[in-house]
Amino acid sequence: MRSRSCSRTGCSAPAVVTLTFAYADSTAVLGPLALRAEPGSYDLCAVHGENLSAPRGWEVIRLPDAGVDQGPSTDDLLALAHAVRVAGLGPDVGAAPEPAVSRRKGHLAVIADL
């Protein structure tokens, strides 16, 4: 298995942490190295992970042991993905109600506003 390099331009150090963003909450999450590179996440070396800063108004969440290279863990990755997903969806995470079909005309249906 080939180790991944830091995502920062010009840095070839091995990646030890993964940075993910929850844009809806203006939050950057720095956690353990993901199992594989994913779109929208950035692998960082120890130096860039330690010196990470966020824009004004953003919060940086550093998960425990994010700076220690313990290798990727499926449990940590799934927990991180779930936390980012829940943070982006807000407190009322539920299925959207089915829209009411009020009238059919041929192959088209009129959807009523809720």
Image (cartoon, rainbow, N blue to C red):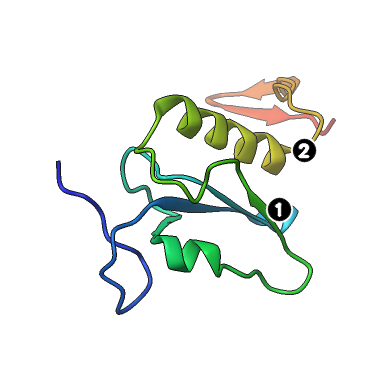
Q: Residue at x 45, y 46 (%)?
A: 68
Q: Residue at x 71, y 20 (%)?
A: 98
Quick check: marks 1 and 2 in contact, CB under 8 Å?
A: yes
Query: Which residue, given by chain and number where applicable, does mark 2 sit on?
Result: 90
Label 2: state its secondary structure.
Answer: loop
Instruction: Pick the residue in front: 81 or 61.
Output: 61
Q: Residue at x 39, y 41 (%)?
A: 34
Classify the position of the C terminus by image quarter. Answer: top right
Indicate left or right for 63 with 4 as reference: right
Instruction: Compare marks 1 and 2 and give the one earlier in the sequence.
Output: 1
Amino acid type, residue under disc 1 in the picture: Ala
Query: Which residue, given by chain and number where applicable, does mark 1 sit on?
Result: 24
Residue 38 percent across, percent down from the top left: 37, 47
Classify the position of the N terminus by image quarter. Answer: top left
Amino acid type, residue under disc 2 in the picture: Gly
Is 88 rendered above or below residue 104?
below
Cα–Cα span, label 1 and label 2: 9 Å
Residue 12 percent across, percent down from the top left: 25, 69
Residue 65 percent across, percent down from the top left: 53, 42
